[in-house]
Image (cartoon, grey):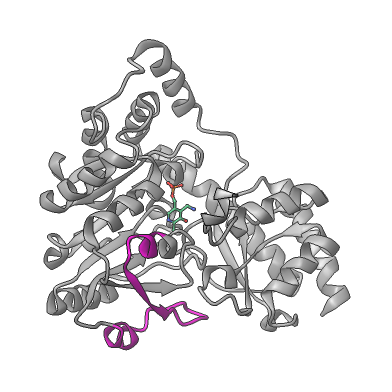
Amino acid sequence: MDVTRRIAISPSTTIFESTSRRAQARGAINLGQGFPDFPEPAELLDAAARAVRERSNQYPPMRGLPTLRDAIAAYYRGTQQLTVADEEIVVTSGGTEALAATFLALLEPGDEVILVQPLYDSYLPLVERVGATARLIDLQPPGWTLPLEALEAAISPRTRLIVLNTPHNPSGTAIDMATLEAVGALCERHDLFLLCDEVWEATLLDGAPHVSPLHISSLRERAVKIGSAGKIFALTGWKVGWVVAAPPIAAAIAARHQFLTFTTAPSLQWAVAEGLALPLVWYDAQRARFEAARDRLVAGLGEAGYRVLPARGTWFVTVDLAGSGLPADDLAVADQLIDQAGVAAIPVSAFYVERAETNYLRFCFAKESAVLDTAIERLAVFRRAVA
Ligand code: PMP
């Protein structure tokens, strides 16, 4: 008998992985999966190499190296004016593990969780694996604003957690303080936890400050903030992330983390601690580089007749297909783009639970100028032929 028939995996491969594979097979420029092709930050690479040689490579403390936890607290003090205590931090293997540990810690079978679409693809499978049920609400394009009335209407007596993501993948938009305060009032009124996926917090462009639920005093005791060094330093494969939450919540998450991965490579933790201590001008330079890349892609697509929605964070912009004179069917257009234009993008419908087509495609701008220019040329030719 074939025991593997008992394995139920859904979905089998993420759209990011399958698009990257298809792009590679066709020789297409990959503006799909979100990773930069810029030179990697030498400061962090050197620090990691040094740490491998000069530091212990044995199990570090379960909650993360004290030096890294100190560096995370100092980073948030310096960049976001947040005061975070050591017992509020748990280092995890990327934002992904932080999400899993948080869902495991805060949810019981039968609980309800409010998720906001378009959503990052790991949320729903993890929530369902815990035995909880997701209630879905939709951001409203073109501003991708959070509909507060729909959010409140989705709350039931079983609701335990709201999940937000800011800056938001795939739209590149960010939540403002007034909206967060309104969500905070809902959480208090209905006694809910709030998980805020802030892995893109360092990518806000144009000098806008990042706002977190931890800035709101009423949320300080009920919000979980998730961060990722992979995004802060554009080293997506490093998978060093963390959770920041009030001590009892952090302790519950640490209890889950210890049986998920227990800990994360110490060399990378040392390197991230060094990175977080870099002067603010280093971060400014990094941000300027991403700003220039975004502006290049947005201007190029605009000249080629595409309607690009405003984006101020992450490494992504979304294109309004109908507004660009193309069919409002992101799945079909994404296929055509790979096959005919030689450019890969991610259909935004992949970020919805019901995979009906949407009117939006996500493009990653974190690429070298020459790569962006070639992609823009190809997309211009494509649009002239199709629109
Ligand atoms: N949340 C969001 C919204 C993301 O976009 C990503 C990565 N693309 C993650 C979490 C996962 O972060 P990490 O790579 O640190 O696991």
- Looking at the image, residue 40 lies above or below residue 374: above
Furthest residue to the top? 54
Between residues 286 and 263, which one lies in front from this camera angle? 263
The reply, left or right, for residue 63 in relation to residue 328 is: left
Residue 261 falls in image quadrant = top left
* Residue 204 counted in the magenta span: no
Question: In the image, which residues are magenta?
Answer: 126-154
User: How many marks overall?
Assistant: 0
Image quadrant for the C terminus?
bottom right
Q: Position of residue 352 (x, y in %)?
A: 52, 73
- Looking at the image, residue 346 lies above or below residue 329: above
Q: Position of residue 285 (x, y in %)?
A: 47, 42
The reply, left or right, for residue 69 in relation to residue 4 is: left
Q: Residue at x 37, y 32 (%)?
A: 272
- Looking at the image, residue 59 lies above or below residue 80: above
Furthest residue to the front? 1
- Can residue 125 be seen in this snapshot? yes
Q: Position of residue 104 (x, y in %)?
A: 28, 55
Between residues 303 and 50, which one lies in front from this camera angle? 50
The reply, left or right, for residue 79 in relation to residue 355 is: left
* Residue 151 counted in the magenta span: yes
Q: Residue at x 26, y 38 (%)?
A: 258
Residue 55 falls in image quadrant = top left
Furthest residue to the right? 385
The reply, left or right, for residue 192 in relation to residue 364 is: left
- Can residue 211 be seen in this snapshot? no
Between residues 328 and 46, which one lies in front from this camera angle? 328
Q: Position of residue 239 (x, y in %)?
A: 43, 39
